Every structure is written in structure tokens, then in C-alpha cells.
Image (spheres, coloured by chain):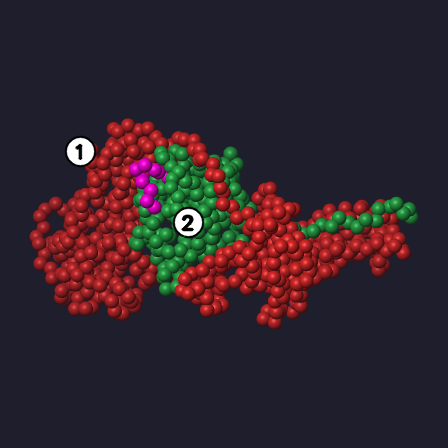
Amino acid sequence: MSKDKDISPPELIKDRGALHPINHMKDSIMDLLISFGFEIVNGPEIETEKFNFDMLNIKKSHPARQMHDTFYVEKKSNLLRTHTSPVQIRGMLEKKPPLAFISGGKVYRKDDDSTHLPMFHQVEGIYVDKNVSFAQLKDLIYKIIHSLFGDNIELRFRPSYFPFTEPSAEVDILSKEGKWLEILGCGLVNPIVLENCSIDANKYSGLAFGLGIERIAMLKHGVTDIREFYKSNLDFLSQFK
Amino acid sequence: MKIAYRHLVQHIKESPSIEEISESLFQLGHEHEIEGTLFDIEFTPNRGDCLSVNGLLRDLSVFYTVETNQEIYSSEIEELQLDFENLLPDVCPRITFLKLEIDKNPNLYKEYLDNYFKDLNLNKNNFFTDISNYLSYETGQPTHCYDSNKINGKIVFSELDTNEEFVTLLDKKINLTEKNSVFSINNEVINLAGVVGGKNTSCSSKTMSVLVECAFFKPEAIMGKSLKYDIKSEASHKFERYVDPNCHDMVIRRFIKIVSDHTNIKNISIYYNEFEQNEIHKIPVNVHKINKILGIEINKDQYLNYLIKLGFDISEEQISIPSYRSDINNQNDLAEEIARIIGYDNIVTDELTIPQSKISNKSDIEDKLRFFLLDQGFYEVINSPFVHNSFDDSIKIDNPLDSNKEHMRTNIIDSLLENLTFNERRQKDSIKLFEISDIYTKEDNQIKKTRRLGVIASGRVGHNHEEFSKNINRKYLSDKFNDELPNENFNFKVLNRETINTKIKNEIVVSEVNIDSFSPEILNYKHKSKPPKSFNQYFAISDLPYSKRDLSFSIKDYSSCDTLKEYIMGFEDKLLKEVFIFDYFYNKKNEEIKIGFRFIFQSADSTITESQVSDRMGVIINHTKNIKGVKIPGLK
């Protein structure tokens, strides 16, 4: 046997890990929005009623404030934020317009089934400037959806209701199976919310939007049961390298 | 709410098809499903005014010619001398009672009333309750019917703040707790306001004299009561979403008319109780503002015409908001009305350019750490913050979803340990996980937030010929991390396995560190891992057990080594989950290469059998034994 034959060991294939698909999706969306001009603001997951509800024009009588929808902590002194919107309130109180914020992270609601979990993730954005219109909001939403799902995706805007936006809309995309799937909520910032943050609503207007990360990740990866994301199963996690 | 197509279309001159109405409803923001000839509509919580046939017709009148020709009793009604006291005018600023006596109960209902029960597949109850239910469907105003012969005393509307048993008209016993707005006679509750009436005063098929209560309750007084007492109440659903405070006279007169359509009325009398005038809310006409909000160009005539169609009154450049539209308060609300009529999809986009922010505020250190850990083979996990175990500094959830998990976690490691044992039970022999999360604790009665990294590792170092035979231990991990990031202290610890129910003996190494303890020097680390370029399609996971086989080869002709590797690593079978080289050795003395492969099989449908595995291994062996210079030691 000739000695110049190759006896080098096989290529060392080292197993690299993977980002969690939800965090990866969140990062991707945040990066996209940063490229549009937004900056990140962060805030706590344990919030006060003032920031989570009052400042956002969610009245005392709103069902979301009930014990069956919201987790309260430490004898109702605080709550687990039900959306990332309070972060934007904190941002608006700190800075003056024009401003463009995004916030992403965990939010909590009292739900638990194959499509809802008590903990899930949102990314929300807000842009406040002079003369921001619904037609401009639509332009931004088209850009976001086309970046996420491709330019050929069909989408529609439906009137909806959020206390913190007016007009409010929900946006659906048309699936390959021909079904409309709700993908995000958006609207023009309710002038009451701007005034709550000491922003002159006669001078400034704003747009806001929010996306549920799990829902988009489920669609993009073809995951049908939201609970799979949080079992920490290596057979699941290793599929997202 | 279910509304029958024919109950709508009978009032629409153009007679649109069910599909045409469906399209109009979507444009107006009334999401729904069509079930046969019924619309099952999910109204947004601000549109309590649409929770009836008439309410929905008001909205549809922007697209169609709507004629609601429901007749009402138009004669004068004598005053009812009712012994009633309202101790909660803030909760119920308006209430009307109608006392009505009939000759006899009708045997048959008129077509319009009968169709309501047939079309919506509802059960009839008794004459007066049936009219009350129908009227709520038609007008949106819930009414409650008491058998007036059972009203023996002064009716008081007040707040009950003591525990009391209450039997509903559906014979359900509930314990009223905390504060409740109730109607009572001699301190006995006869009606949980806005939710459900009591059995003690309810109507029956024998009732000939009825006392009809028609009230306006403030939504916050009714909110959550039906859920609290587990009562399915259409009335509370409507009161929670605001009913028209100005409709009482019309509703009561319609009630009388429906009764008179069916039987002879002997006596009618009415009692009004009004503590608060409903002020007409006005907003100035400002079409320029509407155009600015929406980014459109409509003229003033078009704008006002749309509003008039929706029932708004315009005079002296002021828009009077109808009493049933509690959701309209400012110009943005009016803009939404116009957008709904135009159609959101018909508003042309206007390019938005946001000035680029100079800062992104991305957490670079955290991101760098994540990619460093990916390079070391760690997988990122996300865990729920709700746990069973509590410590002095734990934050307690007042209303947990699971009473077994009523605290917020105070560390990440406990969650990671659960993840580790979960994966060990799934026969994983190399487990490396990490999580970055905010952790909340109590400190001097204040809530404290820290952002932390948690790391856990156990089992084999890796699935390759160099790392397969090495086990993760504290020294290995400390040295490895120290080599890569010499300035960071992960402070690895070994976790005691005694608290875990497992036979596995591998060392469990953990670390939990505050993110702010890492130095900016970490940003100099050049990571090799990258986020995936695309979003992989997920394949469903099998929960069935694995079966593994090892196969070792002896190779004298080195040139065959690549042929062997290519065949085995490229072998495809739906039961073969993973294959890797776990051993490689060059024996200089014998001038031969020893190479070992591990095969892991798993079925998605049933527990994998010995013969299924043997069949696959047989194919591999038959092929590889014929490769020149390759032998399988021990194979006969």
C-alpha cells in the first residue's frame, strides 16, 4: 500500500445550535423595521394599569381589563403587559415628535389552546409626525407584508376596533388554500393617546401597527400547533438552523 | 350574534343576495361566517348599536335603500303608579316600566314572530318572554318581564354588598358575592340587573299581567357579571356594549303593538324614571380634517351625504351624533365612518418615508452571546415564566391560569433543567440549551427586573468522531468558553441530579449570569454561525422511541474511504433520522482505517420494529461489503 494515500480523518462536522424560531422571526421583523427608519425602545413586562390601559384609552369598562383576560400580580398592584404598546407610551413620554419606535417582546393574556398561549410575542411600531395619514399607513403595511410574504401576496384591509387607534384596521393575507388569514392590526393613533402623552394632536398625527410573531412564524414554517414552540424539544429546535 | 338573511333583506328595497350583503358587511367591518341562511357576526366591542336587525340595517343603509316599517302603538298611555326607588341613578340613569294586562294568551304567533324562532332555531318560552327576546333581536334593547301578580311590594334598585343565594329564571342557583346591582322587593333579589331575572317573579304561560322593565345600565356596572356567575346572557352582552338610552319609548310602544297583534289588551300603563338627560354630542363639520386623516379627497357634499345615510344630523356646521353611537367622539371616529363607506381597500396608498434613525438600540452584546452559544452547539429556548416553586422574592400572580403555577420564576436554570430532562426522556444524549430572558423579583416591595442568560449542558460533547466519546463536564465547558471568551466569567456549576427522577448519570453543567456583567469586548468575537437564510418548513415530530445501530468498517484501500462515506452519509430512508461518524482511527501498524457510523431510526406512525431496522441495515451492509478494500469486522 502506497504511503502517499490519503489517511486524513473525515471532515469534522460540528453541530451548531439554532436560534429559537420565534426569536429569529422577531429579529427578522425588527431588522426590517429598523431598515425602514424605526428605532427600538424597550420596556418592562410587568406594567401598571396606567401604562397598559389608561394611557392607551382602554377604559375601565373594557373587557380586556377583566381578571379573566389579564394576569394581575401582587394584589392587583401591577399586571403582566397584554401588549407591547405601553413601551411606546413610555417612548412618547420621553421623546418629542417626529418619532418612529418599534418594541418587541413577550406579552401575556389568559388564553391556552392550540392557537393561543398565555405567553406570546409581539412586535409593535409607532410613527408620529405632521400629516401622517391612513393612506401612508397602508403604504407601510404593504411594504411590511410584501417583505415578509413576497410581492405577489394578496392582502386586504378590514375595519376593526382598538381603543388606541382610530381608524383601526386588521390586515388579512390570502393563503395558498384560498383562505384569508389575519396577520396584523393597525390604525392611526387615537388623538386621545397622543394628548395623554402630551403630544399636540392638532399638530401631529401618528400611525401604529402590531404583529403577532407566533402567528407569522406558524405560517412561514408551517407549524400548526403553537405549543410546539415552547416544548424546548431538540427535534423541533434543530429544524430551524 | 346570529342574524337571518331574510330578516334583513325584507327591509332592503334592492333585495341583495346573501353574498352581496356579506360583502357589504365585510366592508363595514362586521366579520362573519355564513351558516346556511344565517349570518354569524362577530361585532367589534365598540359597535353595540349593531347588535340587532335594526342596528345592522342602519349600517347597511349606506349601501342600500332600507325601509324599516315596524309598526308601533301610537296612542297615549296612562301613567303607572309604581312603587319604585332607584338608589343607583349613576348606574341606571333611565328606566321605564310598562304594565300590561291581556285577556288570554294566544295559541299561535303571527308569521313575523314565528319566523324569528324558526329561522334562528330557538325555543319558545312564554308569550311575554318570547316578545321580549324578539324585541331585543329586532331593536337591540333588552327588556325584562316580571309577572306583575308576583310583584308584592316596593321595587328597589340598589347595590347589594352581601353574599346571597339567587335562583335565576332558568332555575340556576348562584351565590351573589361582592358588589352587585340588583332589583329587590323586601330585600329579596328579583333581578340581577342587566344579566338575568329571578325565578321568583318570572313569567309563565299563565301570566296575564306583565310588568316590562326597559332600562339603560352603564356598561361598567354590568361588565364581567355574566362570566363571573357563568350565565349565558344576551342582555348582558348588549348592556356591556352600550344600548341606546333614547329608545325606551319606541321599544315599549313596539312591545305593546306586538302584543296587540296577538291578543286583546285590557290595560296599559307606563312609568318613566329619568335621572339624567342624554346630551346630544356634536362635532364640527371639517371635511379638510377628514381628508387629511385618511389621505383622500372627498368634497363636503359627499362627506355629509355619507353621514346622513348613517343617521347623523347636520345643522349649522355641526354634526349631531345619534344617541346609539357611543363610539363616535372625535374627527378620527368620523374619518373611520367615511373609510368604512369608501372601503379601506379603495383608499389609495401614499408613499411613506420615515427619516432614518441614527440609532437602532439593538442589543449587540446579547446578540453576540447568542451566536457564540450557537457556535458551541447550543440551542436557544423560550420558557414560560409561570412556575410552582416560590421563594421570598417571588412575584405572585393574583389570577393564575393554572393554580399549580401561581408564581413568576426567579431563575432560568430551573426551567432549563425541565427542558433537559424532557429531552433526556426523548433519548437525547447530547443536550446544550440556553435562554436569555428578563427575570422579575421583589426587592423591598419593589419589582426588580434583571436580564439574564441561562445555560445548561449534559451528555456527549457532540455527534462527531472527535466529540462523541467525550462527555460534557464543568472543566470541559469552562475551558472551552474561556478559550473563546477569556474575559468573561460564566461561573459554571454542576447541578445535583438527586432531585431529578432519572437513571442517567451524566454531569449537568449550568450557568446563570446577568447580561450586564458581560464586557463590550465580547463584540470582538467572530462568530461562525449565521441565522438561517430562509424560513425552513417544519416536519412534524414523532413522539415514538428511537432505535440505534452502530456499524464499524475496516478499510485497507484508503481510496475506498470516500466511497463508503458518500454512500452511507447519502443513504436516504424515511425511517433513518440521523447518521453520523462516531469513531475514526488510523492503525499505523496494520495500515488500516477503522471508521464507525451510528444510525438512528424512528418511525412517525408506530414504534419501530427490529425487522424494520434490520431490513435497512441489511441493505447498507450488502452494499458496503462489496466496496473494494472495505470489511465489516465480525460479519459472517
SS at mark 2 in the image: helix
Amino acid type for the residue under numbered disc 2? Val
The residue shown at (46%, 66%) is: B393
Pair 1/2: label in front: 2
Evaluate whether residue B64 shows in this view: no
SS at mark 1 in the image: loop
Give the residue at mark 2: A87
Which quarter of the picture shows residue A70? Answer: bottom left
Evaluate whether residue B158 shows in this view: yes
The residue shown at (41%, 35%) is: A138
- Residue B495, label in figure: none
- The answer for how far apart the CA atoms under marks 1 and 2 are is 42 Å
Q: Which residues are magenta?
A: A197-207
> Chain letter of disc 2?
A
Q: Nearer the viewer, residue B50 or B488?
A: B488
The residue shown at (25%, 35%) is: B307
Chain identifier of the green chain:
A
The residue shown at (59%, 61%) is: B511
- Left or right: residue B237 versus residue B96 is right
- Left or right: residue B631 versus residue B200 is right
Taking the magenta stretch, the answer to whether it contains residue A198 is: yes
Give the residue at mark 1: B316
Q: Give the colour of chain B.
A: red
Residue A240: where, in percent of width, then height?
Answer: 60, 48
Residue B320: where, in percent of width, then height?
Answer: 21, 39
